[in-house]
Image (cartoon, coloured by chain):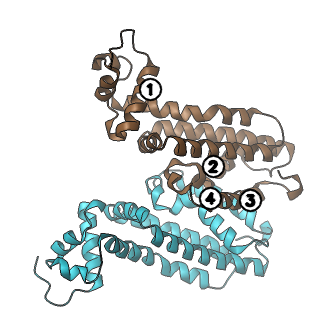
Chain colours: A brown, B cyan
Amino acid sequence: MPRVETPLTRDQIITAAENVLRRFGPAKATVVDVARALGVSHAAVYRHVANKAALRDLVVGKWMEQTMPPLRAISAASGPAPKRLRKFFDTLIAIKRRRATEDPEFFSAYRALAAGASALAADHVGELVELVAAIIRSGVKEGTFRKVDPVTTGRAVLLASLRFHHPVHSDEWNAPTIDEDFAAVWSLLMEGLCVSKSKRA
Amino acid sequence: MPRVETPLTRDQIITAAENVLRRFGPAKATVVDVARALGVSHAAVYRHVANKAALRDLVVGKWMEQTMPPLRAISAASGPAPKRLRKFFDTLIAIKRRRATEDPEFFSAYRALAAGASALAADHVGELVELVAAIIRSGVKEGTFRKVDPVTTGRAVLLASLRFHHPVHSDEWNAPTIDEDFAAVWSLLMEGLCVSKSKRA
């Protein structure tokens, strides 16, 4: 691999770390491995990341961040809350499934790293809860949802649908019943959240 | 370890396999390891189990079976269905948490083995769904639950509460918010399942 002559960027480091992870698995994403893959000195990488944990956080953080823009857009949009809530979860589930299917080596490495990156994971879940809570809040206001606490109920809807979007369950996403299982869970949750059937999405 | 002179029993093999798992982890529960722990020939163990997979199924099957008697009793009991359904899940969650806390080495080995024992896991989940469905069916009959399909909804309630009883989530059971998280999920599910607040447990 040719030596990189221009100064290293954060993005180059992240891309190299992703490739190392994809090829060699989560045990191999060290500063030394990434420096070797880039053909640069350890010191050049250490100028951007303090240690292995910081390197992994960069990769995990980037992947978490990449799921967010479409979800933020749905949460901020207008329109009936039940429809937006469904669209939010359909999108969340579709993004996760697409990643697990299209880049399985990286997804499996990501799953292992994310399990160890608890601060990042807490922030990620925190933002998801906020986005869901915003939709629920507008549903309460427009009268389609019962008068629930938006944050508590937003977190409950995320937790109750873990099977369908939490990476730890990705091996089950190919099960033949996965879509009807989600439909059954969703129907029960919406029965609990919505004011009346006639107003439901 | 003294040689076992009397014929080996299935239970002795299971107990020895559990001890091997506890001490050396899931990679080590082979027929050879168990024979060594018992001080008997491989052939003596092979008389009971055909291979490593069969040995692991014995251990996983025993642990799954041990969770069932109290749950079967609650499902078969009489009394208001909403109260029984709550008791069922409180008991299921308490059993899993107790095991994860009291025997963490074995629980972690069990978690890894159970993930590979898909036929056993499917039977286990199948029985849990049936037991929950029986409670829901009696709730529909007594008029406390809406007229739902008991099996579909039973499976949905189990899936929606995975975070609180599926071994893959056991690292999260010590989270400070775990009880309020369950309360929020449960409240949403019961809002969806129950006919009216006044009749709810």
Element type at mark 1: helix
The residue nearer to you, when weighing B76 against A113, is: A113
Q: Real-space Cα distance between discs 2 and 3?
A: 14 Å
Q: Earlier in the sequence, mark 1 or mark 3?
A: 1
B125 left or right of B3?
Answer: right
Q: Is residue B16 above or below residue A188?
A: below
Pointer 3: what residue? A187
Residue bearing mark 4: A178
Give whichever of discs 4 and 3 has the lower sequence position.
Answer: 4
Q: Which mark is residue B170?
A: none
Chain letter for mark 4, please: A
Sequence-first disc among 2 and 3: 2
Tags 4 and 3 on a common chain: yes
Marks 1 and 3, Cα distance to the nearest angstrom?
Answer: 40 Å
Q: Which residue is mark 2?
A: A158
Return the x and y of residue B200 as percentages of the image width and height.
74, 70
Of the residues shown, which amino acid type is indicated by label 1? Thr
Residue closest to the far right = A198
Q: Nearer the viewer, residue B124 or B140?
A: B124
Residue at 84% from the left image edge and 38% from the top image edge = A79
On screen, B124 above or below A142?
below
Q: Residues within 10 Å of mark 3 (few under 14, many from 20)?
A: some
Q: Could you say whether the residue bearing mark 3 is in a helix, strand or loop?
A: helix
Q: Quick one: A10 or B160, which is closer to the camera?
A: A10
Given the current orientation, which residue lies at the most extreme top position?
A6
Frontmost of labels 1 and 3 is 1
In the rendered picture of this protein, how many numbered marks are placed on residues? 4
User: Mark 1 vs mark 4: same chain?
Assistant: yes
